[in-house]
Image: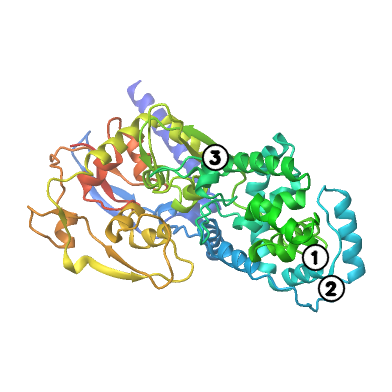
C-alpha cells in the first residue's frame, strides 16, 4: 500500500514538472529581465542547508532620475511680467511725454487723415467728451502710434487688471467710463507712482486733496496708492468738478491743474469755455493733458485696427480676494509662507508703504491675494500668525548684531532690478535689504550700491564664525532620537511643517541649520527636538 502511494506521488510530481516546463516566458518579461544578478548564500529554515538567493539588481526610480527644469523662455516671460508689475519706467516716460508734449507733424502713412477724422467722429458720438479733429490731436496720435507702440502694448496688458475695477466705481458715480484712460495719462497704471510735486497713486492725488476725499496717509499706509479707495475718491472728485464746470473736458483739465487755474485761463482767453480755445492759457503740463488723454482713448478703442497685441496678464482682478488681518504681518513673511513672488504681493497691496500690514483696533486693513492662495492662508491661519509672532519677538535684540566682514558685499543696481529680485538673487529678505541700507521705500535707482550680507547674523556677545560653522551648528539643541523626514519631489518647508503638528518653518530651519527655503530632494531633515 505504501509502495503504491509513493509511486502515485512521484508520478504526479513528474507530470506537474513537465507541464510547467512547457510555459514559455513572455517576451516583454524576458526583455525586462536584468542582465546581472547577485547570488548570496542563505540558511534554510527547514533543514539548515545553505540555499542560494538570487537578488535582482535594483533599478533607480525614474522620478528621482528625472531632473525637472522650467522652460527657459517661459521663465523669462514670467520675470518680465514681475518686472512690469513693479517697475516705474512707464510712469517716468509718460509723465515726461505729457509735460513736454510735441505737436510737430509726424509722417505715419498707415493712418490717413480722412480715416482718422471718421473714427474720431464715431468715437465722439459714443462719449460725452468733445472729440473733434484738429491737427494738433492728429500729430499726437500719430506720434504715439509711431514712437510709443511697446509702451502702449504693455499698458494694454496691465489694463486687463485695473479697468474692470475702474469701470465699476466710475459707473457708481455716473462718470463716463472712458475716464478710465485718465489713469494711464496720470500714472501709467502704477499705484506707487509719485510725481516731482508729490502727487501719488493711480489717480495722482496731492496730500491735501486726498485727505479731503477720505484718503488717509500714515507711516504704514498711503491710501492714495490703494487702487479701490483712490478710484472711489477720484470718482467723487471728478463728479464735483463736472458739477462746477458742466463740461467734461474742463473737468479733466481742472483735475490736473485745479479749478482755480482753469477759471484763470477762461478769463485770460476772453471768456472762451472750449478747452482748445483756453489751452494756450493753461499751465504747460495741463496744455498737453487732454490731447494725451484723447490720443490714448483713440488708440485703445482702435487697438485691433492698428495691430496691437494685448498679452493676458498672469491674473485678473476677479482672480483675487482679500483677507482681514488679525495682527501685524509683513508681505515678506506672506511671500515666504505662501511661496508667492514678493513683486506679486507688492502689486496687489501697493498702499502699504513699508510692505507691512499694520493691525490697529477699529481700522480695517486687508491683504489681497491671488484666489488660489487664499484657501492656503485661511486653512493655516493659526500657524501663520504663530510664525509671525515668533518673528516679531526676535526683532528687538539686547545687543547690536554683528556680521562677518568676509560676508559683506556690495551690489550695483542695474536696469530691471527691484528689491524683490535682488533679495531672491542673494537668498535674503526684502526687509533685510531695506534694514542694511537704511531704505524707507522700495524704490532703487540704476547705479545705486546696496550692501548685502550673505550669512546669518550673530550677536556681539558671540564669536564670529565662518559659513561652515554657522550651517553645521544649530541654534537649538536637537536630541539624537529626533524624528526625521526625507525630502521628496515637490516638498517645501511649508508643506513639511504641515505634516508635523506643532512644528513651524522656523523650527525646521533652526533644527537643521537652514538659512533659506531651498530644499534638495533626498535630504534628511530633523522634524522634532
Residue shown at 33%/22% (left/top)?
A: 2
What is the x, y in percent for residue 100? 64, 71
496 and 314: which is toward the camera: 314
**C-alpha gap between disc 2 and disc 3:** 46 Å
Using residue 299 as the reference point, say whether residue 504 is left or right of it.
Answer: left
Mark sitting earlier along the chain (2/3):
2
Residue shown at 79%/61% (left/top)?
A: 276
Up/down of 400 relative to 42, above or below:
below
**C-alpha gap between disc 1 and disc 2:** 9 Å
What is the x, y in percent for residue 417? 45, 65
Q: Kindly give the residue lying farthest to the top in the view shown.
A: 1
What is the x, y in percent for residue 183? 64, 52
Q: Which residue is mark 1?
A: 306
Query: On the image, which quarter does residue 287 sit in?
Result: bottom right
Q: Which residue is mark 3?
A: 212
Residue 296 visible? The answer is no
Mark 2 crowd level (few <14, some 14–19, many ≥20, 10 Å Cα): few
Residue 510 visible? The answer is yes
Up/down of 72 relative to 385, above or below:
below
Amino acid at each position: 500500500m505504501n509502495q503504491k502511494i509513493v509511486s502515485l506521488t512521484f508520478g504526479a510530481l513528474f507530470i506537474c514538472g513537465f507541464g510547467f516546463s512547457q510555459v514559455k516566458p513572455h517576451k516583454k518579461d524576458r526583455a525586462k529581465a536584468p542582465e546581472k544578478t547577485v547570488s548570496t548564500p542563505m540558511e534554510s529554515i527547514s533543514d539548515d542547508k545553505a540555499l542560494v538567493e538570487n537578488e535582482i539588481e535594483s533599478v533607480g526610480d525614474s522620478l528621482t532620475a528625472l531632473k525637472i527644469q522650467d522652460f527657459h523662455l517661459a521663465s523669462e516671460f514670467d520675470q518680465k511680467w514681475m518686472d512690469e508689475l513693479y517697475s516705474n519706467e512707464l510712469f517716468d516716460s509718460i509723465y515726461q511725454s505729457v509735460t513736454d508734449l510735441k505737436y510737430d507733424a509726424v509722417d505715419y502713412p498707415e493712418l490717413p487723415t480722412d480715416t482718422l477724422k471718421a473714427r474720431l467722429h464715431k468715437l465722439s458720438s459714443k462719449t460725452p467728451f468733445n472729440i473733434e479733429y484738429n491737427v494738433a490731436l492728429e500729430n499726437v496720435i500719430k506720434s504715439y502710434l509711431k514712437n510709443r507702440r511697446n509702451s502702449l502694448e504693455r499698458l494694454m496688458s496691465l489694463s486687463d487688471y485695473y479697468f474692470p475695477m475702474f469701470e465699476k466705481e466710475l459707473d457708481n458715480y455716473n462718470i463716463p467710463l472712458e475716464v478710465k484712460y485718465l489713469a494711464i495719462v496720470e500714472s501709467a497704471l502704477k499705484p506707487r507712482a509719485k510725481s516731482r510735486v508729490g502727487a501719488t497713486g493711480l489717480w495722482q492725488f496731492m496730500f491735501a486733496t486726498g485727505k479731503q476725499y477720505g484718503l488717509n496717509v500714515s507711516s504704514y499706509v498711503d491710501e492714495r496708492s490703494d487702487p479701490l479707495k483712490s478710484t472711489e475718491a477720484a470718482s467723487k472728485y471728478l463728479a464735483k468738478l463736472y458739477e462746477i464746470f458742466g463740461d467734461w473736458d474742463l473737468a479733466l483739465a481742472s483735475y490736473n491743474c485745479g479749478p482755480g487755474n482753469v477759471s484763470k485761463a477762461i478769463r485770460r482767453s476772453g471768456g472762451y469755455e472750449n478747452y482748445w480755445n483756453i489751452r494756450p492759457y493753461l499751465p504747460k503740463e495741463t496744455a498737453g493733458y487732454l490731447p494725451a488723454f484723447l490720443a490714448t482713448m483713440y488708440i485703445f478703442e482702435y487697438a485691433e485696427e492698428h495691430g496691437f497685441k494685448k498679452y493676458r496678464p498672469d491674473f485678473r482682478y476677479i482672480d483675487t480676494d482679500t483677507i482681514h488681518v488679525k495682527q501685524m504681518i509683513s508681505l515678506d513673511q506672506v511671500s515666504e509662507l505662501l511661496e508667492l513672488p514678493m513683486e506679486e504681493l507688492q502689486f496687489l497691496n501697493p498702499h502699504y508703504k513699508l510692505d507691512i500690514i499694520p493691525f490697529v483696533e477699529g481700522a480695517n486693513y486687508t491683504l489681497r491675494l491671488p484666489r488660489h492662495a487664499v484657501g492656503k492662508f485661511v486653512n493655516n491661519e493659526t500657524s501663520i500668525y504663530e510664525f509671525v509672532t515668533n518673528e516679531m519677538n526676535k526683532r528687538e535684540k539686547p545687543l547690536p548684531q554683528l556680521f562677518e566682514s568676509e560676508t559683506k558685499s556690495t551690489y550695483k543696481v542695474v536696469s530691471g532690478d527691484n528689491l524683490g529680485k535682488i533679495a531672491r538673487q542673494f537668498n535674503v529678505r526684502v526687509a533685510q535689504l531695506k534694514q542694511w541700507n537704511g531704505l524707507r521705500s522700495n524704490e532703487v535707482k540704476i547705479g545705486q550700491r546696496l550692501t548685502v550680507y550673505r550669512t546669518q547674523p550673530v550677536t556681539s556677545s558671540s564669536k564670529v564664525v565662518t559659513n561652515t560653522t554657522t550651517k553645521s551648528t544649530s541654534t537649538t539643541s536637537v536630541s539624537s532620537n529626533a524624528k526625521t523626514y526625507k525630502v521628496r519631489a515637490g516638498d517645501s518647508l511649508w508643506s513639511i511643517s504641515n505634516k508635523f503638528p506643532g512644528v513651524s518653518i522656523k523650527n525646521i530651519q533652526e533644527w537643521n541649520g537652514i538659512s533659506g527655503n531651498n530644499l534638495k530632494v533626498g535630504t534628511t531633515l530633523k522634524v522634532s527636538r
